[in-house]
Amino acid sequence: MMMSQVDLRTEARNAERFAANFSGRAGVAFPRVYLPLDSKDVLVETFCDGIPLRAFLDIDGHTPFDRELGARGLDAFLHMLIYDNFVHADLHPGNIMVSLSPPFVGSPLDRFVEDFYDMSPFNRGRGMHEKQLPSSAQVHRHVRSILDSHEADEISTHQKNKEIHAYADLLYQSGFTASLVFLDCGLVTLLDDFNRRNFIDLFESVCTFDGNRAGNLMIDRCLTPELVVSPDVFVLRIQDIILRVRKVSLQLSKLTFSEIFEPVMRAVRIHHVRLAPDFINIIMAMFILEGIGRRLDPESDVLRAALPMLRSWLKEDAKNELTYPQHARGSTSPSTASWNLLKVWMYIELREYLDRVRSWGYDDQEFFGEFSPFLTADSSLA
């Protein structure tokens, strides 16, 4: 693995594949690579302008962009894990940047229409709000200057936090949106067909809160099932953990990944259940994601975020597009897994509906969605 990291062409191919996987998904970007110019010792890719994610993690309180950033990061990771089977295995904050974009920059056509209307005689009495907004590069430069001033001890931590909060509030009120840029694609986790099957079976067991089956699957699919110590006790331990997960439905504000996987890893160590290295890489990536997600949006819900991708998987499964050449011991047929997941989805949808009813009328976002920032837009931003 270390030798593959020395060859920069590996990172170039990974970045190209990530870019292709996320080409139709807004809010996440990867550097564009130039394969004809890349070699074992040289990597040529586009420059990505942005703000270090640490700028949002290291301040007191939350900015208006935190929830959006947390949702985008969680959605991107689940997309890699469930849909693509190609996971960025080095997603620490140093490899993630935030890009803040002004409104009406969705496409060159949007900008052309806005510019044409600004110059047309029909634009009587219309303010130049869009023209007064700073560009993404100017916003990033301003935020980085605040961070640099703090690093040079020119301003205190309190002053840095105050300036970032004030500037973020102003940008949000003016309609700016946040997106993520993932860097350093050298480390990835890609499950082969056998481990992919194991993961889907185990994930389905967790989603249906079947702790007994999840424990047995971990034993059956481990590297040395014949060396497992006290398998019945191990299954009971896993079942107890899954029951705790069921009570809170993976809501990060009530249960952390460390609270789930710490006892799982302890049970794995005590009972000598040797897991495949790819599973460990995924678990470590989830630990990092959980830390970032809890900091940005403590109310993030993993099952709710995974719901669209699980629906897509169910649709493909129903069309027999997701097939397995053979069934391992303890697995269920695609139709059975689909029905089990459907029951869980019905529960999640009902819970989401009840949550909305309880909070109805208290959040403008509930009614206006992505247009809510424009309701209080401040045209004084320069």
Image: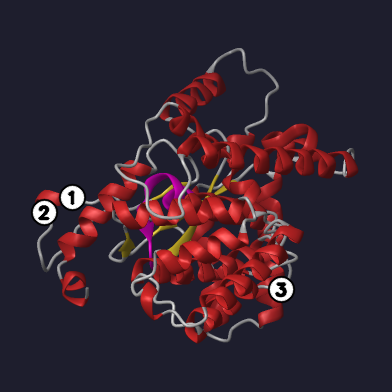
Out of 319 and 66, give the one closest to the viewer: 319
Tell me which numbered mark, 1 or 3, is placed earlier along the sequence: 1
> Eyeballing the image, is 151 above or below 374?
below
Q: CA distance from mark 2 to mark 3?
A: 43 Å
Picture quadrant where residue 126 is located: top right
Q: Is residue 74 left or right of residue 25?
A: right
| Residue visible at 71% across and 36% down in the picture | 369
| Residue visible at 9% across and 61% down in the picture | 39
Q: Position of residue 340 (x, y in %)?
A: 60, 42
Give, as a three-letter code, the residue at label 1: Tyr
Q: Is residue 201 left or right of residue 370?
A: left
Picture quadrant where residue 324 is located: top left
Which residue matches tag 1?
Answer: 34
Where does the magenta region start and end?
Answer: 79-90
Picture quadrant where residue 299 is located: bottom right
The answer to if 88 sits in the magenta stretch is yes
> Dot 1 lies on which element?
loop
Which residue matches tag 2?
Answer: 37
Q: Position of residue 87 (x, y in %)?
A: 38, 57
Which residue matches tag 3?
Answer: 60
